[in-house]
Image (spheres, rainbow, N blue to C red):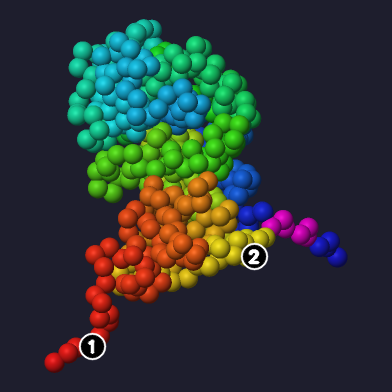
Amino acid sequence: MTSPAAPQSPEDLLPATRRALLRRLAVAQAEGRAPSVVGAVVRDGRLVWTGSRSCVDGHAPDADTQYRIGSITKTFTAVLVMRLRDEGLLDLGDPLEKHLPGTGVGDSTIFQLLGHGAGLAAEAPGPWWERTPGTLRPTLADVLGEEPVRHTPGRRHHYSNPGYTLLGSLVEALRGAPWEEVLRREVLEPLSLDRTTAQPVAPHAGAWAVHPWADVLLPEPAVDLGLMAPAGQLWSTAADLCRFAVFLAEGDDRVLSAASVREMATPSTPEPEEGAGNYGLGVQLIRRDGRALVGHGGSLPGFLAGLWVSVADGVAAVALANATGGPLIGPLATDLIAIVADAEPRIPEPWRPLPEVDPALLELTGPWYWGTQAVALKLVADGGVELYPLRGPGRGSRFEARPDGGWTGLDGYYAGETLRVVRRPDGSVRHLDLGSFVFTREPYDPEGDVPGGVDAEGWHGLRP
């Protein structure tokens, strides 16, 4: 008689889901002809799956094997810049010249550089910088070249590796220490990313190119990028990047608050091209099959990397390969998310009533009217409110409480606008004011101080 199987933890993935993940990874490695591929999935802050495939029997990598992650490095650099902002050492609207003079592109703002909206060239001049040592570009002038600006700053998204070189130098100037040292102290150590380093530390994958028309390999150089390190230098593991993905979903007060992490995931420029997604502050923003994802892709000769997070599903995935081209690493990572989120949808937290409620706030809930448009006001946790149309499309937003008793819009049309209660001398509510719009309990309530006034005869039918 066989013993009963151990009960499955509610956090574990189902066997069918795990097989689907492994199959998707295996297809990517086989069809992409990659020497090796590693994947990992984290759900609700917990690593729930890792897998790998290799062309060498018995030598498959694991989630602790380092790969070069290329431009995912930019997200780490952006976190350092946001920390400087949160400490009051700079403002995102500051021109670069204020903190890093003499670059020749100092009119560009820090915000524009973070979002690739500064109009700078995509690449550094001279030999292919990803395959040549940073000693060939010893100064920022060497990185920028004689014509560093390609577009009017602030007008369009134009991905720029030199732009993140400037941000790394900005971090060094304000911290008085090398970028690598600041990153280790302020981000890697607090988040326990012990296997994320600027130089490879064994065990790590080798860098390979696969011939496009034959199943043969060519080793790729893995050079130190010098000043351009903040744009693409880092090595990391699937496990470390999953921990970083949790940070990008939730924030961590030891590094960046949840509010600042959300700010990074807000679009910063017009979409680069139709259907290409958008860019926040150091993170890419895309939609796949109706799912909003935040993260970044990366590549350097011999390596491909992808990290994506679905905050709504509580699922993130990482995919790494040691090939210059071949496997579509970004779609692999997003497919890993979809497999888990679609097969095992997130179970919502139990509904619970608020622990307490202010009767004055409760009085404000329910229907209101802006002119004749009906909207509803609803209380949410932490003293916030939601305003949303009761019929059809319309303007709605979430609001967070302000110290003065009003609320500030968090999203939608009213983002940044102030919602406040206007009361009569006896303390009763006259109306709500939202960015000068008056919301009354009845359509065009004459007692609600409606701009333009209300006809004295009031509502009436069609008269002969």
Q: Quadrant of the C terminus?
A: bottom left
| Among numbered discs 2 and 1, the one appearing first in the sequence | 2
Identity, as a three-letter code, of the amino acid under mark 1: Gly
127 vs 189: above or below: above
Q: Is residue 186 left or right of residue 283?
A: right
The residue identified by callout 2 is 353
Instruction: Tell me if mark 2 has few (under 14), some (14-19) or many (20+) residues whose alpha carbon lies within 10 angstroms of its own.
Output: few
Identity, as a three-letter code, of the amino acid under mark 2: Pro
Q: Residue at x 46, y 28 (%)?
A: 85
Where residue 282 appears, as percent x and y from the top left, is 41, 33
Q: Is residue 218 visible?
A: no
Q: Quadrant of the N terminus?
A: bottom right
The residue identified by callout 1 is 461
First to last magenta residue range: 5-10
Q: Quadrant of residue 106?
A: top left
Where residue 272 appears, as percent x and y from the top left, is 26, 40
Q: Residue at x 38, y 58 (%)?
A: 433
SS for callout 2: loop
Where residue 328 appears, as percent x and y from the top left, is 39, 41
